[in-house]
Image (cartoon, helix red, strand yellow):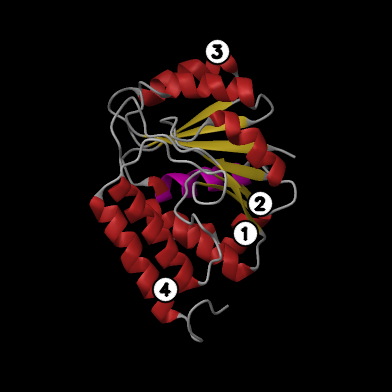
Amino acid sequence: MRTLVVLPTYNEILNVEPMLRTLRKVVAQCDVLVVDDGSPDGTANLAQEVGEDLGQITVLRRTKKSGLGGAYRAGFSWGLEHGYDRFVEIDCDFSHDPNALPTLLSAAEDHDVVIGSRYIPGGHIPRWSLSRRFLSRGGNQYASFMLGLGVADSTAGYRVYSKKALELIDFETVSADGYGFQIEMTYRAKRAGASIIEVPISFTDRELGESKMSRAIVIEALWLVTKWALEQPFGRGAH
């Protein structure tokens, strides 16, 4: 079973080389696709150099910054065209511990979607403030309640999808970005009958570089959840 790690980047010059080298050590059997959104800091060029050194690494260069959702859609499309069976979502900033990836891949042997979850027993967010934790946890609870997801961490960005799941989701038509992208992918997977499992992870804020998350992306996600819930023909959680 061929697995592709899709690694979106934008100005990750400080993180991309250590991440790629760590992934090569931890999951040597997996190929990596770096999807770079035209980083002006040279991220794509460095990733290319590291890829030539390590092997099994391809850089997909995009001309402009178009968001996390767009990067993953491009990465998934590329992977399907090249015959991959499983697809990993992971952040380049080490907020997702690459050492946890073998556990997620093991769970993916029996499930269509594996979510690295902060909000099930065993999940941790060591350095978040109480207010940030409340906002994130509350947003996830709202999404799960309104959409009938049965998932504790639908905004999580550390995931594994099977080829079957991506086809069921019809990911190319997913329009949301950021948190909204992750929720919409979860929502579509649930409605399509894909098997979903959450695996506990420890989530750590980036130490190098700048966060790409903004208040606008959070507001967009909450608005979309409300919109999707109102569009359901038979009320909350309808399929």
Label 1, on which residue?
167
Q: Amino acid at mark 3?
A: Asp
Residue at image location 49% in from the left, 85% down from the top = 233
Q: Nearer the viewer, residue 144 or 55?
A: 144
Label 3, on which residue?
53
**Does label 4 or label 2 sit earlier along the sequence?**
2
Q: Which residues are magenta?
A: 69-80
- Tell me where residue 37 appears, x and y as whole percent: 36, 37
**Does label 2 or label 3 sit earlier along the sequence?**
3
Characterize the local packing of mark 4: few (<14), some (14-19) or many (20 or more) Cα atoms within 10 angstroms.
some
Residue at image location 48% in from the left, 84% down from the top = 235
Q: Confirm or deny contact between disc 2 and disc 3 (CB under 8 A).
A: no
Distance Cα–Cα, label 4 vs label 3: 46 Å
166 to 209, vertically: above or below: below
Secondary structure of the magenta portion, mostly? helix
Q: Confirm or deny contact between disc 4 and disc 1 (CB under 8 A).
A: no
Q: Amino acid at mark 4?
A: Trp
Count of marks placed on residues: 4
**Does label 1 or label 3 sit earlier along the sequence?**
3
Q: Confirm or deny contact between disc 2 and disc 1 (CB under 8 A).
A: yes
Residue mark closest to the camera, 4 vs 3: 4
In magenta stretch: residue 132: no
